[in-house]
Image (tube, rainbow, N blue to C red):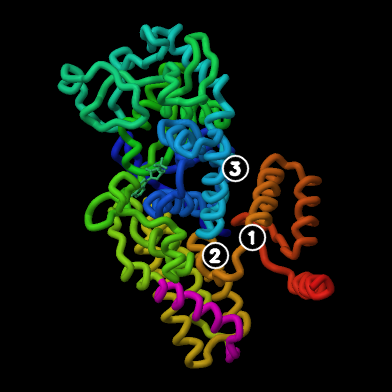
């Protein structure tokens, strides 16, 4: 019988590890704060999104059904400022960066979440939550028609960031209308911002308090509630979101519903440059596209960003990415050797070697995603496997077992497939739709999607780790003759 693994993950709220299991005994519901689509995401942002990808892939490897929601922030001070500067509608401005974000996800082989809601699609529900908060006495309006959350009314304010509010509250600066602010700014925060022509151009929605738009923090509370329910299993993001964003999400959601908002909070530490956070405001950032233009392959960037534990800061250097290229090459070279490996007599060692490797890899990841130990198990395996191949001591069955082990490990690492054989965006979208159909047990739709994928040259297999996709060679041949005919 296959051993069952459960992920124990550090919880920012309790500062202790806890097992991640579905609270409804069915599906783990995970909410991950997504990008603000006002520009290309930088590789610091992708460190966090890749941490969430490793988290997701690990839960899938452990056979936990999972639903992930990642929001796209399309209304905030920055998106509006960008649209006004370019003199184009907000949607035209954000759409280009949304598309770029999805391309970057595919390039880095970040698995698609089940849902990517955009804030502008949930204004009605946001207004409803503000009304509830006003009715329950957690919020108040000001003379301009803005609505604020009164943090003094929510007794547990500060519980996630472990802030001592007794000292801070005395010096608290009243209220803040900005979407982002620093720790020193602990204060009532804006739920609904009254319209200002100068600041917002023509971006506004009607509300019971007049024209305006939602505050940034509100969108996550509302979209998480609508797509995942009042209490979610796991909420993740980068450490900079702990305060104020996640603290404010907790205050809004728990005040509105009276229930615990998220049972578990996981945060990735930052990608640094010269020991400072990589960020747009400091100007010390690289986008994925910048690094690709410098000749780095996507898998090296992926490997570089995932191979340091998510709760350790990671300093960006080009040598670091070059080192990752060497590691990816080692992994691929061994797999290629297995593909065309000449076989000898059966080795008594392979079964144990494969079992031990898989167990060490899973056990390491189960322990707060200990990627260093997981990778150590993989490279030990590659060393032993290479020695067996050197001595011609592996039978076809041994080679099959070793290949399968590499593929299992790669269901989390996702670096085996050569980069130039990346799955096109269109295929990713169909795969995503099929995954959703399967989760909804809509088998007919899932079969139809499988057929259209096949027509487009991609075979899909359903494995315990999820869908596995490969190119069907015969279709590729047909495709090229079609191109010739039309040349
Ligand atoms: P943003 O688009 O700024 O809302 O950020 C999207 C995600 O990237 C959030 O989860 C942030 O916490 C995360 N993030 C921003 N900068 C970094 C960084 N330098 N390293 C790691 N994660 C980051
Ligand atoms: Zn959020």
Q: Quadrant of ligand 1?
A: top left
At which x and y percent is residue 150?
33, 14
Identify the secondary structure beneath mark 1. loop
Reply yes or no: does residue 430 show up in magenta. Answer: no
Residue 271's place in the image compared with 119, above or below, is below
Residue 257, given in percent of the width and then of the height, sits at: 47, 18
| Relative side of 163 to 348, left or right | left
Which mark lies nearer to you, 2 or 3? 3
| Marks 2/3: CA–CA distance | 22 Å
Which residue appears at 55% of the width and 52% of the height? Answer: 60
Residue placed at 55% from the left, 45% from the top? 96
Quarter of the image where one finds residue 13: top left
- Against 373, is 263 above or below? above
Question: How far, Cα to Cα, is label 2 from label 1?
Answer: 23 Å
Name which of mark 2 and mark 1 comes first in the sequence. 2
Left or right, 252 with reference to 109: left
Q: Which of 371 and 64 lies nearest the eye of the viewer?
A: 371
Q: Which residues are magenta?
A: 325-345
The residue singled out by tag 3 in the image is 114
Point 38% across, 64% down: residue: 304
First in sequence, mark 2 or 3: give its number: 3
Residue behind mark 1? 424
């Amino acid at each position: 019988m296959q051993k069952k693994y459960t992920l124990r993950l550090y919880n920012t709220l309790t500062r202790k590890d806890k097992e991640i299991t579905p609270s409804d005994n069915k599906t783990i519901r995970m909410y991950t704060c997504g990008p603000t689509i006002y520009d290309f995401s930088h590789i610091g942002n992708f460190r966090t999104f890749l941490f969430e990808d490793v988290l997701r892939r690990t839960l899938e490897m452990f056979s936990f059904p999972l639903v992930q929601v990642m929001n796209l922030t399309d209304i905030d001070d920055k998106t509006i400022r960008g649209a006004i500067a370019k003199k184009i509608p907000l949607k035209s401005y954000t759409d280009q960066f949304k598309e770029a974000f999805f391309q970057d996800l595919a390039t880095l082989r970040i698995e698609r979440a089940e849902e990517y809601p955009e804030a502008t699609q949930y204004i009605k529900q946001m207004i409803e939550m503000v009304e509830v908060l006003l009715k329950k006495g957690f919020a108040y309006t000001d003379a301009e028609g803005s609505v604020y959350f009164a943090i003094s009314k929510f007794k547990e304010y500060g519980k996630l960031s472990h802030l001592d509010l007794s000292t801070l509250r005395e010096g608290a600066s009243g209220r803040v209308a900005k979407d982002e602010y620093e720790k020193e700014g602990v204060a009532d925060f804006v739920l609904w911002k009254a319209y200002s022509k100068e600041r917002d151009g023509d971006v506004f929605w009607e509300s019971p308090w007049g024209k305006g738009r939602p505050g940034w923090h509100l969108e996550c509370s509302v979209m998480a509630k609508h797509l995942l329910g009042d209490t979610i299993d796991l909420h993740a993001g980068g450490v900079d979101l702990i305060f104020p964003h996640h603290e404010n999400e907790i205050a809004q959601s728990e005040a509105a519903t009276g229930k615990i908002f998220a049972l578990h909070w996981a945060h990735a530490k930052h990608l640094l440059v010269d020991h400072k956070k990589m960020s747009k405001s400091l100007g010390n950032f690289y986008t994925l596209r910048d690094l690709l233009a410098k000749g780095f392959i996507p898998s090296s960037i992926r490997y570089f960003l995932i191979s340091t534990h998510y709760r350790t800061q990671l300093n960006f250097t080009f040598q670091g990415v070059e080192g990752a290229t060497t590691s990816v090459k080692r992994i691929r070279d061994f797999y290629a050797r297995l593909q065309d490996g000449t076989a000898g007599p059966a080795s008594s060692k392979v079964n144990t070697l494969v079992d031990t490797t898989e167990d060490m890899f899973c056990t390491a990841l189960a322990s707060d995603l200990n990627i260093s130990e997981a990778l150590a198990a993989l490279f030990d395996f590659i060393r032993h496997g290479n020695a067996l191949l050197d001595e011609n001591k592996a039978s076809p069955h041994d080679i099959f077992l070793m290949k399968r082990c590499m593929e299992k490990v790669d269901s989390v690492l996702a670096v085996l497939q050569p980069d130039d054989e990346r799955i096109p965006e269109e295929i990713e979208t169909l795969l995503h739709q099929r995954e959703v159909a399967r989760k909804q047990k809509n088998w007919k739709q899932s079969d139809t999607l499988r057929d259209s994928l096949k027509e487009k040259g991609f075979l899909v297999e359903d494995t315990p780790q999820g869908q596995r996709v490969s190119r069907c060679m015969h279709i590729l041949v047909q495709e090229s003759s079609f191109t010739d005919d039309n040349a």
